[in-house]
Image: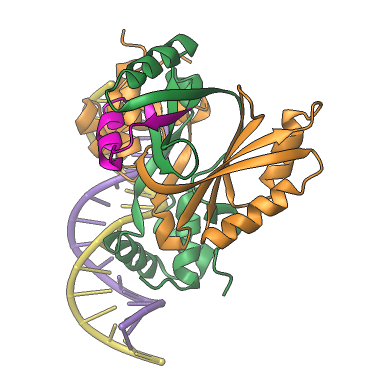
Chain colours: A orange, B green, C yellow, D purple
Amino acid sequence: MELDRLDRDIIGALMEDARATYAEIGQQVGLSASAVKRRVDRLREAGTITGFSAVVAPQALGWTTEAYVELFCQGKTKPSDIALAVARFPEVVAAATITGEADALLHIRATDVGHVERVIERIAAMPFVVRTKSSIVLSRLVDTAVPTARNGSPITG
Amino acid sequence: MELDRLDRDIIGALMEDARATYAEIGQQVGLSASAVKRRVDRLREAGTITGFSAVVAPQALGWTTEAYVELFCQGKTKPSDIALAVARFPEVVAAATITGEADALLHIRATDVGHVERVIERIAAMPFVVRTKSSIVLSRLVDTAVPTARNGSPITG
DNA sequence: CTTGAAAAACTGAGTCT
DNA sequence: AGACTCAGTTTTTCAAG
């Protein structure tokens, strides 16, 4: 899908405040409320905008501890096997297969270090997992979803 | 801040659709629109809800490549030094100090592998960085912000 | 893309439990 | 204290230009 400057500005505005009115967004980008709504509808339809979400402080909900866990798997383990297995843990908030020694990297949120430990134990017990290597997060330095919010477009036309 | 079941339900509803009307949320949780608004205002005031954001597909904006980079720093490097340094790169979407061999872990989003490489080069060139260890993401398996959306409360009262 | 009007939603004040 | 009702105002959401 093609995005022009207006689309990018609208997306930027909605990333900063997803509950802004169409009129407000229109003022920021120089469009009428109706025109903004039509573009937002189109962006949602096209899948560029997946949805709108409240941004909550995980600590406020009790998720005070984070960890990253490298997963070393048996030779013929498929990414889809890993995906299915780790998706069952609500504590696994992100997972990806990666290059390098490890096969996958998991991002875990838990209530405390003991909780992290129990989750890792259960993950390590899965049949295709050979071993794990965990790092507990000491302090979070940066946390954004997508660069756009700060930087505009990656393709600096 | 104390959160009761109603607050948690409202947060859940807003995480699923941050543009839902107060009346809609009220129907889901069994409250009037006004009562919902008052609680949402309170949750925002308390900092439990930080804001509302559009969820965009990074690929649609051109950020098609991800990498994780472990940072090994000089002995007396402070977390705040790392934070300041990496915050200048829009490509660094997450960063944390961690336990283990590495001092910090960065999550990078870029337009392509070449872009990742250039960013890592610039990060590696920073004075306090001794060496880096990068993993390119092959495929993303799981990606959520906070467990709550799927699991309810971490403290199963 | 804009305008304009009808329908829906927001939001504050007052009232009740 | 917290939730409900009600009414004025704003916003959304169409159609037509």
Q: Residue at x 50, y 71 (%)?
A: B5
Which is nearer the eye, A96 or A11?
Answer: A96
- Left or right of residue B152, residue B36 in this image: left
Question: B131 above or below A64?
Answer: above
Q: Is residue A28 left or right of residue B89?
A: left
Q: Residue at x 52, y 28 (%)?
A: A45
x and y percentages locating residue A142 in the rendered image: 35, 39
**Most distant residue in the front direction:** B75
Q: Nearer the viewer, residue A56 or B112?
A: B112
In percent of the image, x 23 and y 38: which residue is there? A24
The answer to whether residue A109 is seen in the rendering is yes
Q: Is residue B72 found inside the magenta-colored segment of the image?
A: yes
Query: Magenta part of the protein: which range?
Result: B69-92
- Locate residue B105: give its quadrant: top left
The picture quadrant where one finds residue A6 is top left
Relative vertical location of residue B35 with respect to residue A108 in this rendering, above or below:
below
Please provide percent x and percent y for residue D10: 22, 50
Screen quadrant of the C terminus of chain A: top left
Q: Residue A93 in the image: x percent, y percent? A: 56, 45
Residue A35 appears anywhere in the view: no
**Residue A145: percent from the left, percent from the top?**
41, 35
Give the total number of marks visible in the rendering.
Answer: 0
B91 inside magenta stretch:
yes
